[in-house]
Image (cartoon, rainbow, N blue to C red):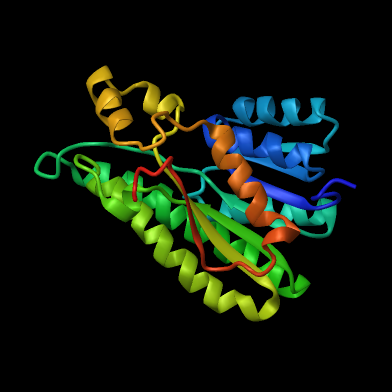
Amino acid sequence: MSVLSGKVAIVTGASSGIGKETVLVLASAGARVIAIARRLELAEETASRARAKGAEALAYKADVTDFPRLAQVFEDVFNKFGRIDILINNAGVARDNLIIRMTEDEWDQVLDTNLKGMFFAIKIVARYMLKQKTGKIVNVSSVSGITGNRGQCNYAASKAGIIGLTKSAAKELSSRGITVNAVAPGFITTEMTDSLNEYIKDAALKAIPLNRFGSPSDIAKGILFLVSPDADYITGHVLQIDGGLAM
């Protein structure tokens, strides 16, 4: 039997990169997967690939900063399946700039999506998981939230906030059998990092002890572990998946 057979898993930011790969890895593990993204066609593309693996998969359009819409999606998922077992909070954006040049809008966009959107999703799903007295939540943070990073005050602040949110939610929800953990990816090859110039990429590579960039699959496999029965006694933990970058 597959490790997640029959489980219902929601993944936000499922259009590409880590979110997309996580949907596919959870689907391969037997979960019924729900891909959420701001563009329906991209969410549907991810769900279609999951269905090609034999999984039951649905796609929804939603922006995590839109609380009413997000609540509507979660309610629809619950009504269809009668439960929500797993939530992967992956939706995130970057608007990099030096702090003296950063605009209020650049700050707000990143904090609203990366942190407030995650708060919304946890607040909504907790209602279902508390009644079930079981559930697993994994939040995607970043090593930037641990070490900081030049030109990323907004992004690093949001990712550090995710760590605090993770630990606090873990303490609040643990009495009902709900675990809340985070992963902190390092430099991962995604569309977001592909746009960086070669100088930045070379400098990053030299700082990674394992001497390679990570892949979305590296992160998705870590997430799979945290939502599997093997991690039933782990909560409030931040799993760094960074090739040693933040040592």
Residue 140 or residue 219, whichever sits in front: 219
In the image, 171 versus 113, the foreground residue is: 171
Location of residue 137 (image quadrant): bottom right
Q: Spot the residue most to the top.
A: 198
* Image coords of residue 191 (percent x, y): 44, 25
Q: How many marks?
A: 0
In this picture, residue 57 sits left or right of residue 184 = right
Query: Relative to the observer, which residue lies in front, 30 or 114?
Result: 30
Q: Is residue 37 left or right of residue 119?
A: right
Counting from the top left corner in percent of width and height, residue 115 is at 41, 55
Quarter occupied by residue 197:
top left
Write down the quadrant of residue 125 in the picture. bottom right
Q: Is residue 53 left or right of residue 111?
A: right
Of residues 154 and 36, the one drawn nearer to the viewer in this rendering: 154
Q: Is 180 rendered above or below residue 63?
A: below
Residue drawn 40% across and 48% down?
A: 142
| Placement of 124 over or under 196, stated as above or below | below
Residue shown at the point (54%, 33%) measured from the top left: 216
Which residue reaches farthest right? 1
Name the residue: 69% across, 37% down: 25
Q: Residue furthest left?
A: 100
- Is any atom of residue 38 visible in this view? no
- Horizontal arrangement in the rendering, residue 191 relative to residue 217 (left or right): left
Residue 39 screen position, x and y as percent: 56, 30
Horizontal and vertical percent position of residue 12: 58, 44
Q: Is residue 183 visible?
A: yes
Residue drawn at point x = 34 percent, y = 51 percent = 247
